[in-house]
Each structure stands twice: as C-alpha cells, then as structure tokens.
Amino acid sequence: MATALITGASMGIGAEFAKALAARKLDLILTARSQDKLEALAKELGDRHGIKTHCIPLDLSVPGAAAKLRDSIADAGLTVDWLINNAGFGDYGAFSNSDRAKSLAMVNLNITALMELTYDFLPTMVERKNGTIINLASIAGYQPLPYMALYAATKAFVLNFSEALWAENKETGVRILGLCPGPTSTEFFKAADFPAAIAPKESAAATPETVVAEALDALDAGQANCVTGGLANKALVNSGRFFPRGWLAKSIGEMFKPANAAQ
Ligand SMILES: NC(=O)c1ccc[n+]([C@@H]2O[C@H](COP(=O)([O-])OP(=O)(O)OC[C@H]3O[C@@H](n4cnc5c(N)ncnc54)[C@H](OP(=O)(O)O)[C@@H]3O)[C@@H](O)[C@H]2O)c1
C-alpha cells in the first residue's frame, strides 16, 4: 500500500487531502503542530478506511524540523510515495511594520521546509520511477501582493520551483503539481490577521473539498499547475500579462491597504 506524507494536516486543505487520500486507500503520515487534531483525524480515517496512520507532531518552521521529520519517518521504516507540502501561513500588514521572527518563520515553513522535504523524498521517488508531490502555492504567487508581500513572494517561489521540477521530472515517472488555490474557507485568513473588511466573503470562497478534488484531477491530467476556483481566479493570475507590473502592484495595493481595510 502507498503512503502519503501530508504537512499541515491538522485542518483546512491539508486535512481534506488526508480525507481524499484515505478514501483512495493510501496510508497516511500526518504532521502539524496540533497533536490532538492530528490524532483525532488519524483515528477517524483509520477506522473509516482501514488504513494505517502515523502522526508526527512538529513545528516545521523551526530550523532542523524537516530533518527530524525525515528521520522519524525512516526510523519507523516508512516509505513516502506521495508528498503533500501543504503547511503554510501568511501575515497581513506593511512589511516595514512586520515582525521579523514571524517573517523568518514564514520563510522557513513556506519555503525551506518544503524544499528540504522535496530533497528528502524526490530522489527515492525518481529511483523508484514512481511518486507524487503536490506543493501548495497560491494565486497570490502570480503577482505582487502589497500588505501580504512576503507571503506572496513565498508562493511565487513555490509555484516556480514546482513547475520547474514538473518539467525536470516529466520522464521520471514522478508527478509534480504546483497547486494554486484562490480564497478558500479555512483558518488561513484568521491566522494571517486579515482584516474582515477585505477578507473574501464566505460565499466567494471555495471549500477545501473542491480545491482538493480539482488538484487531484489536474494531477491525473498531468498538469504542472492548477489554479482552482472559477474564471475570476484564472483571469486574475493572467492579469500580469496584460498590465504593467508597477500599475498592477499599485492597484492591488489600493485594494489591500489598511486604510481601506478599516472603512
Ligand atoms: N485558504 C486559502 O485561501 C489559501 C489560498 C491559497 C493557498 N493556501 C495555502 O494552502 C495551505 C494550507 O492552508 P489552509 O488554507 O488550509 O490554512 P489553515 O486552515 O490555516 O491550515 C494551515 C495548516 O498548516 C499547519 N501549520 C501552520 N503553521 C505550522 C508550523 N509552524 N509547523 C507545522 N504546521 C504548521 C496548521 O496546523 P497547526 O496549526 O496544527 O500547526 C494547519 O494544519 C497553505 O500553504 C496556504 O498558504 C491557502
């Protein structure tokens, strides 16, 4: 039986990947900081689908945590066939006022841990000529996003990195997808301190279920990336082709700036 490692599996999109892959009878290695949530989900899915589950609670933003995760997986004699690099967070506000430690933790989690886990598991997937990696980028990775500047930049990294690895691995038997959800109803906006006035309306946000279903379809279709949601998201990610980048950054900045958020 194949095994999937899912980071950020305690809730939101990661928990939904766990449910979808358990339904496909994959064994699961679930990681995030919230041990209680991981264990509750692991029990529910193990009971429902008769799969094996393993929980490894970790703060992946701490330097060295990805190596600890790799070592725990090796010590348990597990092989990773699917890697879902999902854990991530954002932080709303002007970069000049942002918290340095939080920003470093964001880069460590959104970029470094994702890259390290790819180092840890991609080579053996290539050797086996079989494997799947899904990296959580975002529609935010397609253009500059003032007041979420660092977050959008981390997602631009994930998107470019994933698409390049997709091309490098086209003949290796390893499938790689850069997943770019639009606004999705999870705890993401709360965790990012996103002002309610400019947060996407619940009715305009996708569900984690539809994001994961679209991702798995895109993977089966052999796509390099997948922008989930309706036409508005697809139009948004293409706007950089039609407007000067400075104008785009300024216009998005007007929409996202704290003055508007306070109105
Ligand atoms: N929601 C959206 O609109 C949206 C859109 C585009 C892309 N995304 C991306 O989708 C991914 C999943 O986000 P989500 O929307 O599902 O948000 P979420 O509900 O806030 O879930 C985030 C997950 O990451 C885990 N996590 C956060 N910090 C961590 C840390 N330091 N170490 C280990 N795990 C950590 C959280 O678990 P613990 O708190 O238990 O650690 C949780 O399981 C993220 O990469 C996000 O950037 C989200």
Image: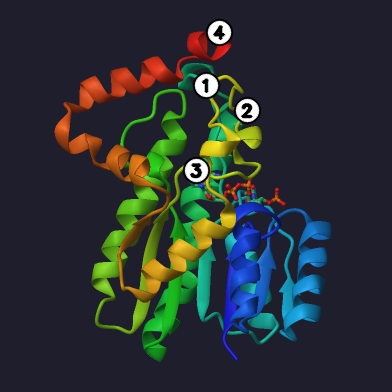
Mark 1: secondary structure: loop
Q: Is mark 3 within 8 Å of ligand 1?
A: no
Viewer-closest of 24 and 259: 24
The total number of labels drawn is 4
Q: What amino acid is at disc 3?
A: Val
Q: Mark 4 or mark 2: which comes first in sequence?
A: 2
Q: Is residue 213 above or below residue 76?
A: above
- Identify the residue shown where x is 73% and y is 53%: 33
- Identify the residue shown where x is 53% and y is 32%: 200
What is the C-alpha distance between the residues marked 2 and 1?
8 Å
Mark on residue 205?
Answer: none
Whether tag 2 and tag 1 are in contact, CB under 8 A, the answer is: yes
Q: Is residue 218 above or below residue 180?
A: below
- Identify the residue shown where x is 30% and y is 68%: 166
Residue labelled with disc 1: 93
Mark 3: secondary structure: helix
What is the C-alpha distance between the residues marked 4 and 2?
16 Å
Q: What amino acid is at disc 1?
A: Gly
Residue labelled with disc 2: 193
Which class describes the residues within 10 Å of circle 4: few (<14), some (14-19), or many (20+)?
A: few
Mark 4: secondary structure: loop
Residue labelled with disc 4: 263
Q: Quadrant of residue 58?
A: bottom right
Mark on residue 107?
Answer: 3
Task: Say whether residue 231 is visible.
Answer: yes
What is the C-alpha distance between the residues marked 4 and 3?
31 Å
Mark 2: secondary structure: loop
Mark toward the viewer: 1 or 3:
1
Position of 93 compared to 221: left or right? right
